[in-house]
Image (cartoon, rainbow, N blue to C red):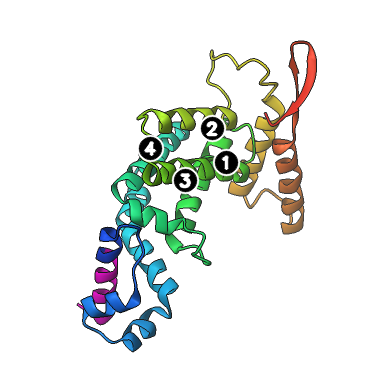
């Protein structure tokens, strides 16, 4: 095993066993039997080491995401993705907290890849006319809610002890993001979704078809317009009165 790999394995073990997920570079060096210069040569500083630990820990999880076969139902794939992400948090609480710590000034590569995978599945849903809003905004909403649930479950288990909370939050966020299935009634006051959904679909199809006959500048402008329409507040009727909300 190379010196870098040994340091990484030791650091990952110490993070998993730490009461609060924090480790010291001195403890890592002692356990790996290397000097501090070797650690800093391979990882730059403590943050660089922790970022590498996150990427190392998430690699197996992300490998399953990369290799999974896409189904014909991207919405179900997204439901499954939410559940698997929360399950990973529960199995690896310190690693999950570390990945989403505000102390990490540069997001680990694993966090960025996870977001790209989510956005890709949302673009598939948008291309089928299943999104109420743009895929970018939907990704931000789903990721922030999903990470928030995961962090609360691992950081406050005595308070967040209802086993259904993740599913309930998932379904509530998805109801705000996805067009309801045929035959499913809109919640009261949800407003119309047809125009935003069409705009989101056109935007997704345009991104997937770079040879649509538009110049780079024209395509960028068209996507900007479509995203504005997708994400614009909808005037919904509630008890006979108009109210603004994102629909």
Q: According to the image, label 2 marks what residue?
A: 173
Report if residue 70 is visible in the image: no
N-terminal of the two: label 4 or label 1?
Answer: 4
Q: Earlier in the sequence, mark 4 or mark 2?
A: 4
Q: Quadrant of residue 198?
A: top right
Q: In the rendered view of the protein, which quadrant contains the N terminus?
A: bottom left
Front residue of 128 and 66: 66
As helix, strand or loop, the secondary structure at mark 4 comes to helix
Kindly identify which numbered label has been placed on residue 245: none
What residue is disc 1 on?
Answer: 141
| Percent of width and height locating residue 113 | 46, 56
In front of the other: 122 or 83: 83
Q: Quadrant of residue 38?
A: bottom left
Few, some or many C-alpha atoms within 10 Å of disc 2 (few <14, some 14-19, many ≥20)? some
> Magenta stretch mostly in which secondary structure?
helix
Vertical arrangement, residue 35 with respect to residue 120, above or below: below
**Residue 238 percent location from the top left of the image:** 73, 15
The answer for how far apart the CA atoms under marks 3 and 2 are is: 13 Å
Q: Give the labeled residue for mark 3.
A: 147
Q: CA distance from mark 3 to mark 4?
A: 11 Å
Label disc, if present, on residue 83 of the rendered structure: 4
């Amino acid at each position: 095993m190379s010196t870098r790999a040994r340091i990484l394995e030791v650091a990952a073990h110490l993070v998993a066993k730490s009461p609060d997920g924090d480790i010291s570079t001195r403890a890592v060096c002692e356990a790996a039997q290397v000097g501090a210069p070797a650690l800093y040569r391979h990882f730059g500083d403590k943050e660089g080491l922790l970022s590498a630990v996150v990427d190392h820990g998430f690699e197996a999880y992300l490998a399953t995401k990369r290799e999974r076969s896409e189904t014909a139902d991207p919405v179900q794939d997204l439901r499954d993705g939410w559940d698997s992400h929360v399950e990973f948090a529960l199995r690896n609480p310190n690693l999950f907290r570390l990945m989403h710590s505000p102390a990490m000034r540069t997001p680990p590569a694993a966090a960025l890849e996870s977001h790209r995978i989510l956005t890709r599945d949302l673009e598939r849903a948008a291309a089928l006319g299943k999104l109420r809003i743009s895929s970018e905004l939907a990704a931000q909403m789903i990721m922030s809610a999903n990470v928030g649930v995961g962090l609360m479950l691992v950081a406050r288990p005595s308070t967040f002890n209802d086993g259904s909370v993740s599913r309930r939050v998932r379904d509530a966020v998805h109801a705000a993001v996805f067009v309801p299935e045929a035959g499913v009634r809109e919640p009261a006051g949800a407003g119309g979704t047809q125009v935003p959904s069409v705009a989101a679909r056109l935007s997704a199809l345009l991104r997937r078809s770079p040879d649509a006959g538009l110049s780079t500048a024209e395509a960028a402008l068209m996507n900007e317009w479509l995203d504005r329409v997708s994400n614009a507040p909808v005037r919904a009727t509630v008890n006979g009165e108009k109210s603004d909300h994102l629909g």
